[in-house]
Image (cartoon, rainbow, N blue to C red):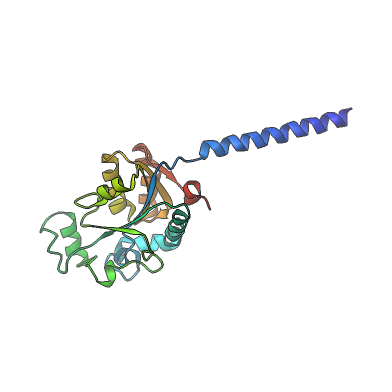
Amino acid sequence: MKKINFIAIGIILISALIVSAAVAAEVKKIDLGKPALLVIDVANDVCHEKGVLNKLGVWKYGKEHGTFKNIAKAIKLAEKKGIPIIRIWIDFLPGMPDVPNRGFFYGAKVKFGDFFIEHKWGAKPFAGLEPGPGQLEVIKKRFNGFHNTNLKPLLDALGVDTLIITGVSCHACVNGTIVGANDWDYKLIALHDAIAGPSEGMCNFLFTKLWPSWGVKVVTISEALGK
């Protein structure tokens, strides 16, 4: 009789664990809504160790954390799910006449030299992250991907209400685009393993403090898109 009781108790415990796991999985399930995957500024000048902006250290963070491979993974998973992929690039004219003699970008030009110059190596996609067939592209001139671009009309035409964010750099163009997206009331999902920045501390602050306080869901690729 005692043996039978132990077996019965064991069955009950196993069943409870299965139910708990199912409930936990349901709680963690993310509603993607009508999403688009944004891939922000994965160009040589910031992602390659020989890029003009290499002193920022984004290339090093990306290499150590496997960020660039993860971005490629996120793109493939989005393609499998039929999620539109929008590549956002920052691009300046030769000599950077589109940057006035003031402000952040002028200061960066003085400090680092000309960067993200159209048609030059530095503005081209980092190896392995070249745009594929059917991927859409938006060119911008500042951090915010919505600033003076066709990104909003494009998202409207696609019926998108959720943006899945990847790219570089967390503190600059990624953060600026998240701010812009919040102003247009999009639901936001940031894939922290597919976003690189200048330092561990900077990334962790944005991933765990700032962005969640703005209502951004900060998750892994697998949590949002599967495996």
Front one among 148 and 111: 148
- Residue 87 is situated, as x and y percent measured from the top left of the image, at 33, 58
Q: Residue at x 28, y 50 (%)?
A: 154
Depth check: 49 or 83 in front?
83
In percent of width and height, residue 111 lies at: 20, 63
Residue extending farthest to the front is 157
Q: Is residue 116 left or right of residue 161?
A: left
Q: Indicate whether 113 appears above or below 177.
A: below
The part of the image, by quadrant, that contains residue 42 is: bottom left
Which residue is depicted at the point 18% across and 55% down? 104
Query: Position of 26 compared to 38: left or right?
Result: right
User: Where is 225 relative to 212, above or below?
Assistant: below
* Residue nearer the viewer, 155 or 41: 155
The percent coordinates of residue 149 (x first, y second) are 22, 53
Residue projecting furthest to the left: 101
Residue at left offset 28%, top offset 53%:
173
Residue 27, above or below 62: above
Q: Nearer the viewer, residue 106 or 140?
A: 140
Q: In the picture, which quadrant includes the N terminus?
A: top right
Residue 126 in percent (x, y) is at 36, 67
Q: In the rendered view, tell whether residue 57 sits above or below residue 161.
A: below
